[in-house]
Amino acid sequence: MSKIIGIDLGTTNSCMGIMEGERLLVIPNDENFRTTPSVVAFTKEGGLLVGNQAKRQQVMNPENTVFSIKRFMGRKFSDKIVSGDIKSIPYKLVPASNGDVWVEVAGRTYSPPELSAMVLMKLKKDAEAYLREPVEKAVVTVPAYFNDSQRQATKDSGKIAGLDIVRIINEPTAAALASGFDSKVRTRIVIYDLGGGTFDTSILELGQGIFKVLSTCGDTHLGGDDFDQAVIDYLVAEFYKAEGIDLRNDRVALQRLKDGAEKAKINLSTLDSVEITLPFIAVTKDGPKHLKTVLTKTKLEEITKDIAESTAGPCQTALADAGLRASDIDEVVLVGGQTKMPLVRSVVKRIFKKEPYAGINPDEAVASGAAKQASVLKGDIRDILLLDVTAFSLGIKTEGGIFSKIIEKNSSIPTRKSETYTTTKDDQSFVRIEVFQGEKPMAADNKPIGTFDLVGIPPAQKGTPKIQVLFDIDANGIIKVSAKDLSSGKEQAIKITPESGLSNSDVDSKTKELGNDFASRLSKGEKLQAEQNYKETEQAPGGEENLPASAPAPDREKQGQKKSIFDLFKKKDN
Ligand code: AMP
């Protein structure tokens, strides 16, 4: 049987793993990094860049560099998350004809699954180069709260990338699987996952080889980016105090501040203080201005304390939903890059009243768990049964707009459940089945996920026909709903049509299109990037960080004209 790799398709970074016999292996990318930024960039010349290369040129090409696409998977343009993000991201979000959110970039529109597929294709390519054999199958992880459209969209991206996603598993379950706790003994664990842009906390119970998610809660707008923003705000305010210049309106300066802030934050996880140096951050008529300051760990903790503390609320909700107290928890597992910050660790310790588990790398836990599950599916590991749960209740709209729940939140999957309904009018020949997910009593207050009509009901008095509605959720968390008229004995079952997402033919055409030109566009992008890097190195041999702070100002800058750092490099060496 061919190899199945595990992929943590992350919002900020992605990671791949595989089990080689008993050994868990993280698959490095072509630059030998163990994680790959989930970033796709389109160059002016029609080339593509994915991963580190795309991230590196983000400062110079912000409108054509797509990051955090996972936030928009399976979402409508009208979604709250989209309207919240649209102002802050530099690339353009547009509504598709079915109301989904798409991205307009480099003169074309792309659906989120297509962009995500580009990340997957790059991962696949790197894995194949590393393993020296074709990789066609993968277990891919998604957040536990991902709904049906988001899971479908993830499956579609696999298909477009030429990768068969044999199973989708929830990220916390994967992390638990990777932690290697003895799943025979009942253990209650918390997975505290704070990544670049999102926060999730899940409570799982392990026992008799079963991994059961008891509850999950989070904040889709909380992550490492917020810590970076706090540092940026601090640096901007300090610079304003010292120089009277407001950097907030200079996009290039802001991107450089973001890089500097993130680097400083990461280094302060192990150091007590760092120096942040951003030469030529602004240009005035008196010449260039440089940002040079020292940030201490104490200061960083002071300005980010509230952000770290705000993770406590979702943790308490997850505990309450699971009917547990902090003292009932046996282990706390940290996942996501931001949990490497000592302040975050101390907040977690206070919430759960115990030292977090130290035996697993937060960046690799999810991919490692996916790799383990791949091994279970291949039959190489036999004693683990993985049980996930639905993160929402599911049901249909009934008379008066009331939401009738068929599957309760936190039910183990796979699952099948049915309820019987009837007609509200005499001789009603069809019923409209409107499917919703959520916890509110009125259907309109929940999220619609699909609609279909059951037609051909024989004439009968109202209240007589028996219409059975069956919900079937598979192990990937993907839902099928069918309806059957029991009273006539005539069976009619119809599958749900998702309210959003790509049609099968869309997926097929995009698969062909990307399959045809991904490799050539990627190699074009990488080649041009390499040439560009070479030119820049030639022009600024020491790199930005090593420029002397007192470098003479180029003539144009003396005249007060603002230029990008790229132009400054060029001019300086002329
Ligand atoms: P992830 O989404 O799990 O890849 O996490 C990415 C986030 O983790 C980014 O905001 C990074 O800045 C942050 N991060 C990575 N390493 C560290 C570190 N050593 N200390 C603090 N934050 C980190």
Image (cartoon, rainbow, N blue to C red):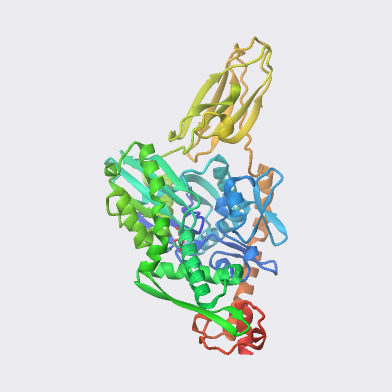
- Asked where in the image residue 335 lies, by quadrant, the reply is bottom left
Residue 519 x %, y %: 63, 63
Question: In terms of depth relative to the viewer, which is nearer, 4 or 533?
Answer: 533
Identity of the residue drawn at 33% across and 45% down:
189
Q: Tell me if 103 is positioned left or right of 402 in this view.
A: right
Q: Tell me if 94 is positioned left or right of 185 in this view.
A: right
Question: In terms of depth relative to the viewer, which is nearer, 399 or 290?
Answer: 290
Report whether residue 516 is seen.
Answer: yes
Q: How many marks?
A: 0
Q: Quadrant of the C terminus?
A: bottom right
- Asked where in the image residue 324 lies, by quadrant, the reply is top left
Regarding ligand 1, which quadrant of the image does it lie in? bottom left
- Asked where in the image residue 211 lies, by quadrant, the reply is top left
102 in relation to 232, above or below: above
Identity of the residue drawn at 51% across and 87% down:
548
Residue 244 x %, y %: 55, 75
Identity of the residue drawn at 48% across and 72% down:
238
530 in relation to 481, above or below: below
Residue farthest toward the top in the current orientation of the protein: 461
Q: Tell me if 74 is positioned left or right of 349 in this view.
A: right
Residue 248 x %, y %: 57, 68
Identity of the residue drawn at 51% across and 24% down:
418
Residue 525 x %, y %: 63, 69
Report whether residue 180 is seen.
Answer: no
